[in-house]
Amino acid sequence: MGELPKVLYIAWDYKKDGSVEAWHSPEGIKTRAGRTYIGRIGVRAREEWSQLSPAELSAATDQWVAEKRAAKGL
């Protein structure tokens, strides 16, 4: 599984188990204390996403982030 596309104000935190945590990270924030956890992309979802074209992966990632941000009120 490759890396996820860059998304504005999102810091990806890759875990040893293959999952990825997404953190809303406003510009200039370098510590976890200033970030907001928005969700985790599990191994199965990453495996499914690895089959997508780069454009489809970018769209899927953007949609996932938008849904998570909306749920957190960001």
Image: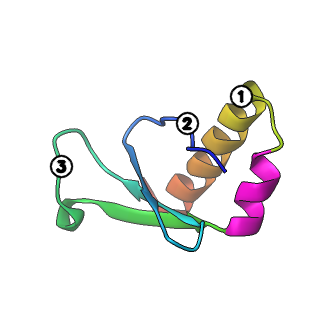
Q: Is residue 38 left or right of 47 when viewed as pictured?
A: left
Q: CA distance from mark 3 to mark 2?
A: 20 Å
Is the residue 16 above or below the residue 14 in the image? below
Query: Residue 59: percent from the left, percent from the top?
Result: 70, 34
Amino acid, disc 3: Ile
Q: Disc 1 or 2, which lies upstream in sequence?
A: 2
Q: Disc 3 or 1, which lies upstream in sequence?
A: 3
Q: Which residue is mark 3?
A: 29
Q: Nearer the viewer, residue 30 or 15?
A: 15
Cβ atoms at labels 3 and 2 below 8 Å apart:
no
Amino acid, disc 2: Pro
Q: Which mark is residue 13?
A: none
Please report the bounds of the magenta region as a residue range: 43-50
Cβ atoms at labels 3 and 1 below 8 Å apart:
no
Q: Residues within 10 Å of mark 1 (few under 14, many from 20)?
A: few
Cβ atoms at labels 1 and 2 below 8 Å apart:
yes
Query: Residue 55: percent from the left, percent from the top?
Result: 73, 25
Give the SS element for disc 3: loop
Q: Which residue is mark 2?
A: 5
Query: Residue 60: percent from the left, percent from the top?
Result: 72, 42
What is the residue that sits farthest to the bottom in this orientation?
17
The residue lying at 23 percent from left, 38 percent from top is 27
Q: Disc 3 or 2, which lies upstream in sequence?
A: 2
Is the residue 39 above or below the residue 62 in the image? below
- Predominant SS along the magenta part: helix
Q: Which residue is mark 1?
A: 54
